[in-house]
Image (cartoon, rainbow, N blue to C red):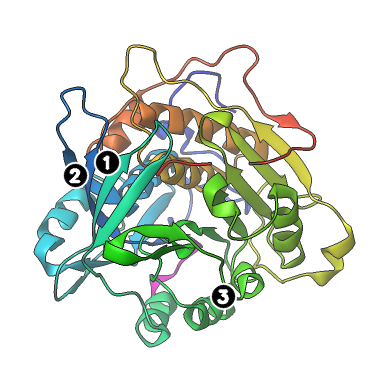
Amino acid sequence: MREEGVPMSESEDHEVNAAGVSAARGRRRRVGVIGTFVWDVIHGHSPAGAAVEGWGGIAYALAALDAALTSGWEIVPLIKVGEDLAAEARSFLGELRHLAPDAELVETPGVNNRSELRYLTPERREERLSGHTPGWSWEELGPRIATAGLDALYVNFLSGWELDLPTAVEMRRAMSCPIYVDLHMLVWRPMGAGVRTVTPLPSAGEWYRCFDLLQVNEEELVALASDPAALAMDTHRAGVSCSIVTRGSAGVHAFAAPGFDRLEWSANAGDESRASTAPSVLAVPSIPAPEAVTPDPTGCGDVWGATFFGRLLVGQRLADALQAASVAAACNVAYRGASGLGAHLRGASVPRPAETGVRSGSGGGASRSG
């Protein structure tokens, strides 16, 4: 286990993964990533008042996953990108240490997704979407999954239409490996002029059955359940092993199925026998960014989730992976943009106050920026 304040590095390459196989022996394991590259224009964080532009969307998660994994793993992007920004997206992928040798983006005609973000408070923002990178149909995605040799899959809804429900159901049927999801933009629907609003998710229970680990933030929670505990029971009944509610500066609540302490290499079975057994709750306080830094919370939820899943993949136990994710999110607050973020996360460490750590118990309401 890593000592406090020590950054993630390649020194853990011989760590035994959840399947009990040393990553230093045999073939590399492969984690697929589904999401959307988004070109961000961010208002409200520059001291001079100027807008800041750069890669957002799945770029934050890719950088964090790259920093969290050891050399026994490689990243396989299952990502479409608009032809207008395809070259820039490929250049970003070139920053990743763990990119699979056969990795390729799917270039699509038209304008790539763009997002204009205006921060109303340090943790609340308005987001306006333009462009339209299309999502996956099962006819497109199925053959790629069949030949990708994946050992795990990370899904982040950053446009909200990366997958529809029938495609997600077929994906689950085809895959017996752990699947992580950040529901995020699946519950944020474009309204007038591209502004997004949280709306209820139809057939939420069917969506839950498609995934093993599930993440939402505090704002998104209201579209799914009355409170974090209710969401935890709903997802738990559907077979989700761990549901996460991120709460921005208030930290994180994790709800784990009984006995879940690390990843098991089997799929979500939708075990209805769990209905009468409440999941356990772990509360993780947030870690403050260095005081000298002008905080930028953009992408923190993406960094948190990708780090959490990545650390579980390399064999960390639940509490340790939760803490590693919170350290990474705090590092992200102190860094602007996604380009170069992986190197920053590998090289930076955030001192942890003595009282900071994972606490077991019951928790109430549960937010995320990014």
Tell me the residue that label 2 is attached to. 54
Mark 1 and mark 2: Cα distance apart in space = 7 Å
Q: Quadrant of the C terminus?
A: top left
The disc, 2 or 3, on the residue closer to the chain's N-terminal end is 2
Q: Secondary structure at mark 2?
A: strand
Above/below status of 60 relative to 79: above
Left or right: 302 with respect to 335? right
Residue 282 position by quadrant: top right
Tell me the residue that label 3 is attached to. 172
Tell me the residue that label 1 is attached to. 338
Q: Quadrant of the N terminus?
A: top right
Question: Going 62% across and 11% down the picture, which residue do you hit?
Answer: 354
**Between 63 and 199, the one nearer to me in the picture:** 199
> Residue 125: within the magenta?
no
**Between 229 and 2, the one nearer to me in the picture:** 229
Q: Amino acid at mark 3?
A: Arg
Left or right: 113 with respect to 216? left
Mark 3 and mark 1: Cα distance apart in space = 30 Å
